[in-house]
Image (cartoon, rainbow, N blue to C red):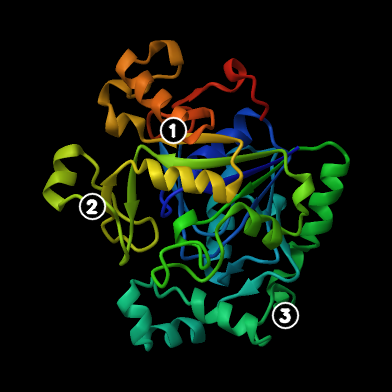
Amino acid sequence: MLTLIVGGFFGDEGKGKISAYVSLMKQYNYAARTGAINAGHTVVFHGKKFKLRTIPAAFVNEKTKLLIPPGALIRLDVFFNEVKELGVENRVCLDYNTGIIEEIHVNREKQDSILASIGSTFQGVGAAMSDRVLRRLKLARDFSELARYLCDVPLLINNALDLGEKVLIEGTQGTFLSLYHGTYPYVTSRDTTASALLSEVGIGPKRVDEVIVVFKAYVTRVGEGPLEGELSRDEAVKRGWVEMGTVTGRPRRVAPFNFELAKRSIMLNSATQVAITKLDALFPEAKGVKTWSNLPSHVKKWIEDVESYIKTPVTLIGTGEEVDEIIDRTLDLGVEL
């Protein structure tokens, strides 16, 4: 079984939490994380907060093998620090063709005035992607210190699927930060939709079983670019929607849930189901609730209104920071995960 997890808005939707939950509770054998170090996944597990930039959030399941695919971009210091902190040395595999960001890429971006104007994170990602397109980027196979981690990720995953094992692909950022489908030029340096996840990992589209698009109960984005319905800082504080970027520490801009963007995201990603996180920020009375029956009727109605508009079942609902603070409706709705 192959499941994709994709960001539905502008990133920061809680993909890390959903990935961690799915891997842990649904017992996935493999998890691959796409993207680069400019996007962070935050996971709160047993009271401890982990901020990940390279390793899949599925690390919480000690039986899940963790993969970094050929289309990803990593930085050596970030990779080694996370591997050590998480204690996952014996279950991480890095594809031979994974791209490596070096200091030269960071320095090049800091000197680019255009990147400053669009709100770049200055992590060297765009410069490294440029070098890859020009066929001059160094890859994982070029670094001897990575030798013990190297493997053929596409072959590993496709063989696993042939054997009936479960594979999870964690997407990066959000649909509307896509280089092709986002709010250009205020976008990232790659496509971020479900199709791109497959290409980045090395899997054909006919192998996909489920596509989970993750939305937050409100919309946030970091950096410049349009944000319909954007609230003032004071209003965001009043509503309890103040957040900081995982990688940059910059304050996230905030707006109410955008039904039209959600509907388009469903279309662009061929979503089969939806996860909604931070319901407790929109409805404090939902904090920590783990069963659908215990949600107040007006909260259920909001979820049902979302489902009706986007015509896609909402199967996972985050009601708190912890990985297990989720309402799981998969069995009730007859959805496999």
The reply to whether discs 2 and 3 touch (Cβ–Cβ < 8 Å) is no
Residue at (76% x, 37% y) in the render: 1
Q: Nearer the viewer, mark 1 or mark 2?
A: 1
Task: Choose between 84 and 204: the one closer to the eye.
Answer: 204
Q: Which residue is mark 2?
A: 230
Q: Earlier in the sequence, mark 2 or mark 3?
A: 3
In this picture, residue 102 sits left or right of residue 153? left
Q: Which residue is mark 3?
A: 142
Residue at (33% x, 47% y) in the render: 219
Q: Earlier in the sequence, mark 1 or mark 3?
A: 3
Task: Choose between 69 and 142: the one closer to the eye.
Answer: 69
Which amino acid type is shown beneath numbered disc 1?
Tyr
The location of residue 169, given as percent across then percent down, is: 65, 48
Q: Residues within 10 Å of mark 1 (few under 14, many from 20)?
A: few
Q: Which residue is mark 1?
A: 309
Label 1 secondary element: helix
Above or below for 303 versus 227: above
